[in-house]
Image: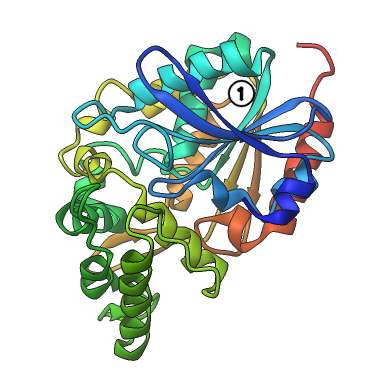
Amino acid sequence: MMKSIQRAGFRESNYNTGEVTLHYAVGPANGWPLVLIPAQAMPWESYQRVLPELSKHFRVFAIDVRGHGKSSWTPGAYTFNNIGQDLKTFLKEVVSEPAIISGNSSGGLVAVWLAVYAPELVRAIVPEDPPLFSAEWPRFRDDCYAYHLFKLAAETLGTDKKRNLAQFFARLEIPIEGRKRPTKIPTPLFKIISGLIYIYILIFPNRPIDLPFLPLETRVMIKGLSMYDPDFSRACVDGSMFTGFDHAAALAKIKCPTLLLQANWFRHEKYGLVGAMDDQDVAKVRSLVKDFHYVQVDTGHVIHLEEPEIFIKEIIRFSSTLPQVT
């Protein structure tokens, strides 16, 4: 844990739901509970840039969902309904009062799920660039770059005993807006990263891979991938992750205030949608959610990591508009 997070009063803990163990960090009781749910393959530490400031205004919980970080792996049992049930139990037994739920990417879909299926435990939700409508089958397979990313993860990451991050980065293709041909990690940079990973594993064979001298975005991604169950990606690639979770039907049932944060997106000739939602998706969400608020942020997918000050400002501003009594 970073020293700035420790100084802010955060501690790490575990909670057993009876089915899985959920690992989380929690800060001091300085206001309403705020539960943060990371993107797929990301650990709770992806929020480290926003935790100290948010903890001055809220009691912040940052959690590893099943298959991530130090939480349980459950191969063959990754669905949004299962993850939602995990978090519902966590809200009831650990958080113990209605919370603001913010989730990034797939975590945003979990926030939507909780607003529908655990409304008594949810004060408001802040889906952060969630793949609403794009992460439904078969559109996800046919029109989303993320499908190819998760397919690569499922094929290359290996097992918990033998992780192969170098192969993942070697085959990774990155679409660029306005360019037909995707780019790849430059060979010199790839050699540096793969070499550092190799050395780290030799020295610390049983630890999550943490390379503090890399840029934070890269460091968190590598650490997250080193602790991530590839079967979570397989569930997305074969469509089983999405079973029984209809986005339009869920959104129409949301009664709590909802702030949608949307990051940049574009379309690529080979990969389709690069990003979580296009403008048509946002318009559809707007038409379905009754108490709807919206902010577009000129940044990449992980807003809280790339634009932490904007994320903090919007969370605090939105919370100030909420009723004091639920």
- Residue furthest front as drawn: 203
Above or below residue 93? Residue 304 is: below
The x and y percentages for residue 143 are: 25, 53
Query: Which residue appears at 30% of the width and 80% of the height?
Result: 183
- Residue in the image at 56% along x and 49% along y: 45
Residue 260 lies, with reference to residue 258, above or below; the image says: below
- The residue identified by callout 1 is 290
| x, y percent for residue 63 | 53, 35
243 left or right of 92? left
Please indicate, yes or no, whether residue 137 appears anywhere in the rendered image. yes
Q: Residues within 10 Å of mark 1 (few under 14, many from 20)?
A: some
Report x, y in % for residue 37: 53, 37
Q: How many marks?
A: 1
Left or right? Give the position of 60 relative to 207.
right
Helix, strand or loop under label 1:
loop
Horizontal placement of 246 versus 271: left or right? Answer: right
Query: Depth check: 175 or 248 in front?
Result: 175
Question: Toward which corner of the image does residue 4 lie, by quadrant?
Answer: bottom right
Q: Amino acid at mark 1?
A: Lys
Residue placed farthest to the bottom in the image? 188
Q: Quadrant of the C terminus?
A: top right
**Residue at 84 percent of width and 40 percent of height:** 56
Whole-percent x, y for residue 25 in the image: 61, 36
* Displayed quadrant of residue 79: top left
Observer-nearest residue: 111 or 196? 196
Asked whether 239 or 235 is in front, the reply is 235
Q: What color scheme is it?
A: rainbow
The image shows residue 167, relative to residue 117, as above or below, that is below
